[in-house]
Amino acid sequence: MIEIVPALLAGDRRALARLLTRIENESPGAAEALAALYPHTGRAHIIGVTGSPGTGKSSLVNAIAQAYRAQGKTVGIICVDPTSPFTGGAILGDRIRMRDLAGDAGVFIRSMATRGSLGGLSRTARDAVRALDAAGFDVILIETVGAGQSEVDIVRAAQTTLVVDAPGMGDDVQAIKAGILEIADVLVVNKADRPGVDNTVRALRTMIETGHPVRRGQMTTHHGQVMHLEADPLPPVDDSMWIPPILRTVAPEGQGIPEVLAAVKQHRDYLDQGNHRHQLERHQVEFELLTRLEAALMARFLGALPPQAMTELVDRVRARELDPAAAVEALLKLPKS
Amino acid sequence: MDAIRVLIAKPGLDGHDRGAKVIARALRDAGMEVIYTGLRQTPEMIAEAALQEDVQVVGLSILSGAHLALVPRVREVMDAHGLNDVPLLVGGIIPDSDIASLKAMGVAGVFGPGTNTEDIIQHIRHLVPAA
Ligand SMILES: Nc1nc2c(ncn2[C@@H]2O[C@H](COP(=O)(O)OP(=O)(O)OP(=O)(O)O)[C@@H](O)[C@H]2O)c(=O)[nH]1
Ligand SMILES: [Mg+2]
C-alpha cells in the first residue's frame, strides 16, 4: 500500500479511493501509508456537518461545496451513513443530493458506512479525512447523522462544526439533543422556506442562551463519559468565547449559503486568534491518542487472555458467584500468555 | 469485516427507480454496502462515482429500452477511468434476445424482469473475489 503514496500525493484519484478502502477495512498496509502521508496533512479546513436525519445535511454539503468551488477551493467530502445492525449492510444515498458536484475534478465524494465498532468508526473517519487532506483538498466536509456518541466523536475531528436543524422535525427542542448542541460552532436552520422556521430559531436561541457555556475542547466526552483532559501548559492568551451564530438556509436554492461560508470563515479567524487553534488541536490529538491507546490496550489484553477465561468468568457472574467488578479484577490478575 | 461495495445506478431518462431501490435494499439485507446515486445518471457520473467509492461491482437498472446504447457507453467511460476490472451488471426490462449482445459488450450478468434478488446476490458474491 505504501507504494501508492506518491501517486496519491500527485493527485491520483484511484490511488486515493483505494487507500480509503484499505482504511475502512483496517487492512494491512493502511497504517504505513497513513504514516507516510501524515507529514502532508494539516493544510485543509475540516468542517463537520451533523444533525437529525432528513434535515438537509447532504443538500447543504452540496451547496457549500459549490460555493467553495466558486472561490477556486477544492473540496473533499465524506458522508457517513448507518450500517444496519441486523444485516451489516448499508444503503449510502447521500450522493443523490450532490449531483451538482458531478464531473468536477476539484471534488471527491466518498460514502462510508458506520460498520461495527463504536470507536472504530471515528478512527477510520479521521484517517479518511487525513487521506483527503494529504491529497490536497482545501476544504473537507464530513456529513454524519447526529444520532450517537460515535457520530459526535467523528465531527470532533473537525475544526468547525455545523449543526443542522429544520422546522417540522417533530418537537423542535427535542430534535437537537443537548450533547450535539454543545459541539456546534455554527447552527444552521435549513428548510427556512418551511412554516415554523421562526419557532425553530427561537428554540435554538433559548437553548444556547440557557445552556452552560463550555469552552470548547476543555472537556470532552468519551464513550458517553465526561473526561477532563490534562490542562494545557500554556496560559490562554485570549479568553473570549465563541457564540455559535444561528443561520437560516434553503439549501437546494443556495439561499443563505454565503452567510454560512462567512460564519465558517469567522470561526476560522477566531481559531487563529490567541491560542484557540493551538488548544483545539492539542485536545483533538490528546483525545485521539487516548482513544487509540484504549483500543490497542484492549486488543492486546484480550489477545493475551487464556482461552475460555472470559467465558468462565461470564458464567460465574451469571451464577452470582462473582460480581462484575470482582470478575474484572480476576481478569486483570490472570496470567497472560 | 470487509463489506462488498456495490454501486447501483440508473442511467438514461426513465423516471422511476422502484426496481433499483428494491435491489439496493436486497443487497443491503445481504450485508453489502450499496451506494445509490439516484435517477438520470450519465455514464460519466456513473464511472466517477464507481471510482471515488471504489466499488467492486456496478449494477445498472435500465427500464427505458435504451440498454444497447447506454451499456457500451458506460463500459467505455469506466474503462477510460481505469475501471476495467470492475464488473458491470445490468437489470431491468431486457429482452432475452439482447442478452447475448450485452454479454458481448462485457456485461458480467443480465437480470431481466422477474429475477429473484437472491440470484443477483449470489452472482455478486461469485464475482467479487474474497478479500
Ligand atoms: N423545502 C426544503 N426542502 C429541503 C431543503 N433542503 C433539503 N430539502 C429536502 O429534504 C430532503 C432531505 O434532504 P437531504 O439533504 O437528503 O437531508 P439529509 O439530512 O442529508 O438526510 P439524511 O442523510 O438521510 O439524514 C430532500 O427531499 C431534500 O430535497 C430546504 O431547504 N427546503
Ligand atoms: Mg444525507
Image: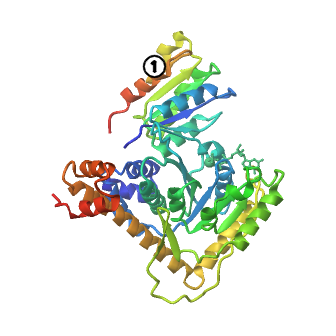
Left or right for A154, reference A301: right
Looking at the image, which residue is at 50% across and 57% down? Answer: A150
Q: Residue at x 83, y 60 (%)?
A: A198
Say which residue appears at 63% left-offset and 18% top-offset.
Answer: B65
User: Outermost residue, top direction?
Assistant: B97
Name the spot of residue A336 as percent of width and height, x first: 17, 60
User: At 52% across and 26% down in the image, what residue appears?
Assistant: B72
Q: Quadrant of residue A288?
A: bottom left
Give the labeled residue for mark 1: B103
Closest to the observer, A239 or B87: A239
Tell me how the rendering is colored.
rainbow
Relative to residue A324, is residue A245 drawn left or right? right
Badge 1 crowding class, 10 Å Cα cut-off, few under 14, some 14 to 19, many 20 or more, is some
- Quarter where residue A250 is shown: bottom right
Q: Chain of mark 1?
A: B
Q: Is residue A208 above or below residue A334?
A: below
Front residue of A175 and B56: A175
Amino acid marked by disc 1: Lys
Look at the image and tell me in which quarter the C terminus of chain A lies: bottom left
Q: Is residue B70 visible?
A: no
Foreground of the two, A192 or B62? A192
Please state the horizontal and vertical placement of residue A102, each as a whole percent of the image.
Answer: 61, 45
- In percent of width and height, residue A112 lies at 49, 48
